[in-house]
Every structure is written in C-alpha cells, then in structure tokens.
Amino acid sequence: MAEETALTGWRLENSYKSLPNAFYTEMQPNSAAAPEVIVFNSPLAAALGLDEQMLQGDLAAEILAGARFPEGAEPVAEAYAGHQFGHFTMLGDGRAILLGERIDPSGKRYDIHLKGSGRTRYSRGGDGRAALGPMLREYIISEAMHGLKIPTTRSLAVTATGDHVARETALPGAVLARVAASHLRVGTFEYAARFCEKEELKALADYAIKRHDPELEADSEKYLSFLKKMIERQASLIAKWQLAGFIHGVMNTDNMAISGETIDYGPCAFMDSYDPETVFSSIDVQGRYAYGNQPAIGGWNLARFAETLLPLLHDSQEEAVEIAQAVITEYPKLYRQNWLDGMREKLGLFKEEKEDEKLIEDLLRLMYQNKADYTNTFSALAKGIHEEALSKDPEYAKWQERWRERLKKQEESDEQVTALLKKSNPAIIPRNHRVEEALEAAGKGDYEVMNRLLAVLRDPYAYSAEQEGYAKLPDTPDEPYRTYCGT
C-alpha cells in the first residue's frame, strides 16, 4: 500500500504527448545498481506540492534515478535539432527523459525531467549517462541562479546510481531531476522546420503558445505575437545574465528555452575580474560565447527561431521574411534597455538621466583597466566601501564623486538608495573556487561543504555575516579557469 501511494503521489500529466509522434520517442526504465539520493531540494518539492515523505526511501531513489517510473508517467525522450557553434545538426534528448508534468498548487505546469538516465534514440553513440560531479554542479549553479532571481530551470534532486560511467577515468554515475516550465527549445522548432510537415510545425507552435502564452490563442496574428514574446523574454534573460556576470558557455540554439528560462548548465561559470572577453568553456576555443558576445548571440539565435516560424507568418515567403525581420530588429533595443535599467539599479539610480550611460561605461572601463572583481565592485557600493583593485586609482575616486553628484539629483533618501543597491547587487555568487571545493569534497563522500555553499546562496542579497567568507576571491587566482560540458 505504501509503495502504491508513493507511485501515484506524483500525479503527473503528459500534455507533451499530445504532439505528433515525430517529436518524441517513448522510453523504458534504465538500470541503476544502487540508487541513493545525494541532495534533495525540499523547498522546491514543497512549492510543487509534492509530499516530501513520498520522495524518501528506496522506491523514491529508484524513480529519481530513472530505474522505475511513477504511476501516471509516460516517459519520452524529446526530439530536437540545433545550431552548435553555428553549425546545424540533429540532436535530441541523448541522455534525458521527460517523466511527465507536475501541476503545482497555483495551477502552473512544470516538466519533471531526468538528466543522465541512460541511452535513448538520440544518444548519437553516447552512453546516455552522467557523472556525479557535473550533475551536482548543475544543481548548485541552477539553484544559485534562482536565488539571484534569474529565470532558470530548477534542480529537485541528484541521485547516485551506484554505477560508474566511462570518461577519461571511471566516474560515479548520477541522475539530475530537473524541473522546468518546459523543455521546448529553439532547437525543437528548428527540428520541426527542417524535418516535419507544416501541420506538425503548426501543432508545435500551438502547443508552445498554449503552454507559455495562452493569452495569445485568440490573437489573429498569434504566431507573430509569439515571436515578439520570445524576443522580449530572451532580451530580459540575457540582460540579467550580463548584470550578474554569468557566462552560459554554450549558447547553442538547442540551449535556448522557449520559456525564457536559463537551461543546460554545462561549462557555465561566473566572471571574477571584469573582462568582456572572458571565456571558461574548454570547447569554446574561438570565444564565440564569451561574456561580451552573449547579447549578440542571443540575437543570432532568435533569428534562427524566426526562420522556423516563416511558414506560419505568411503564405508568401518574401512577405514572411519582411515581417520577421521587422520584429527581430527590435531585439537589440529591448536588450539594451533591459541592461541599462538594470545597471541603473545596480548604481542605486531610480530614474533615467542623460548622463547615466557614460557613468556606467566609465565604471566598466575602470573595472577592466584595474582587473576589478565584477560582483565585489557593485556590492562594495552597497556596503559603502571600495573594491580593493579600484581603491588606489585616482580616476575611480573622481568617478565616485560624479556618482555621488548623480545621486543628489534624486528625491530618494540615502536609506532608499542603499536598499536599492543591496536589492540589485548580490553579496555573493557561486565563486568558481567555492564550487570546485564543494565538488572535490563531494567526490570524497563529504557533502557538507556543498550544503553550506547552497545555504548561503539561497539568498545572495542577504549581506549576512555567513556570506562574507564566500565573497572573497581565492588566495591564488585559478587562471585560466576551465569548465567542461560534463558529458
């Protein structure tokens, strides 16, 4: 009876399977020698309305490892394509399955997705498995992004499988249980446009609209409006990345979610010293996805998305292209406005003034020249202190005088300015050396280091005493720091 309750308690739905069969492959359970839940996200489980008791014990571990499916699940691997480093290729869920969709207490629909659960039709020669370290890394970074109030997929659990995966060496295997508004991607639409009939593309677009923009269903130009919504979401998201110093690392079109959430944390990391050319990914040898290139790449990806919708925008290809181009040209302006609004808030500015752009650009120039830490420069403003690398530069002292004069033009009090500064500038980010420290300890079976890191990252704007040590840079800079896809 207890087992039956645990199985049925997930109460999953399967709206994705309403799409034509071309968009998915049904899956069977994969083996896991000795599944064990390593880290579990109780607050997220509660937000989803899941019974935490249901997610404990051997049966829950089997489900979270993909070795058994809960009642009501109709697991599938999703088909999609994508431009990887600018080159089109057929892809798909090569090591992941969608168990189904959970409706939370507010009525919102979320995918429950298992990453690293084994081979699928789309594995392209891979084993479909994942190692423990990269799955823990995604858990840490995605939950940190949530704390930073940046739209993101979430991590419900990481479960060790008891098996080993063969990489350069044998590594312990694991599965990440991921929660997302959906796993629809630009690459899903590229797949439909390239390999499916127009009616199948239309079915996908209608499904995406119903799922993410239901208010558009009665719109006479709903596909154009859908494109506009997508552009707005991505302009906002990428501006938030830039404002936080986040570098995704692999902005292929299959890693751009229709929902506007950050998805697929592979070689991502946060920037320390401010430098627009910062690249962490070991595979991005040309710097295509460097920090300073992310906004433009977002526009490039959106252009690929617009191309997929051309058959739905107008019967005439020429007319459809003109319609799409007119909309796509709005993206740079939308991004720039989102970024400027965010930068003003990071400087404690409540309203727009003509001088603001130069004030912002001059600060970034000084940060670059002095190799100042990006996060700590702004949190220092909130604390009323100087970032160490800038403290001896007389130009920075002059910049601060200009900044204070700009603040005097506002009606808001010093207390209100400080409150805005602290609200807009995190005291901490998941520093690369702290993440590596946590993963190294976890590799030895010690998860306390990771748990402490997760605890302080839960509210990065708290400016608590516990966070002070996590804001410090490493004693010996780890340069060049390299990240990997974790496949």
Image (spheres, rainbow, N blue to C red):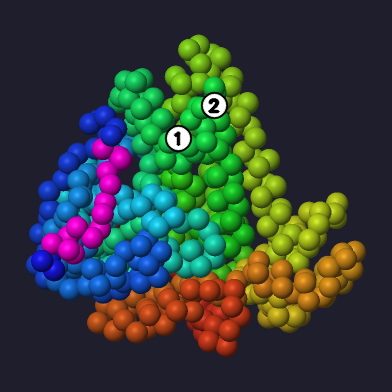
Q: CA distance from mark 1 to mark 2?
A: 11 Å
Identify residue type, mark 1: Ile
Foreground residue, 4 or 368? Answer: 4
Tell me what residue is drawn at x 44 percent, y 27 percent.
Answer: 308
Residue 221 versus residue 89 in the image, above or below: above
Tell me what residue is drawn at x 29 percent, y 84 percent.
Answer: 446
The quarter of the rendered structure image containing the C terminus is bottom left
In the displayed structure image, the side of residue 71 where residue 212 appears, left or right:
right
Q: Residue 175: image x %, image y %?
A: 24, 62
Q: Residue 367: image x %, image y %?
A: 69, 67
Residue 15 falls inside the magenta stretch: yes
Residue 424 versus residue 312 in the image, above or below: below
Mark 2 = which residue? Answer: 219
Mark 1 = which residue? Answer: 209
Report crowding for label 2: few under 14, some 14 to 19, many 20 or more residues within 10 A (C-alpha). Answer: few
The quarter of the rendered structure image containing the N terminus is bottom left
Look at the numbered disc 2 and give the secondary structure of its residue. loop
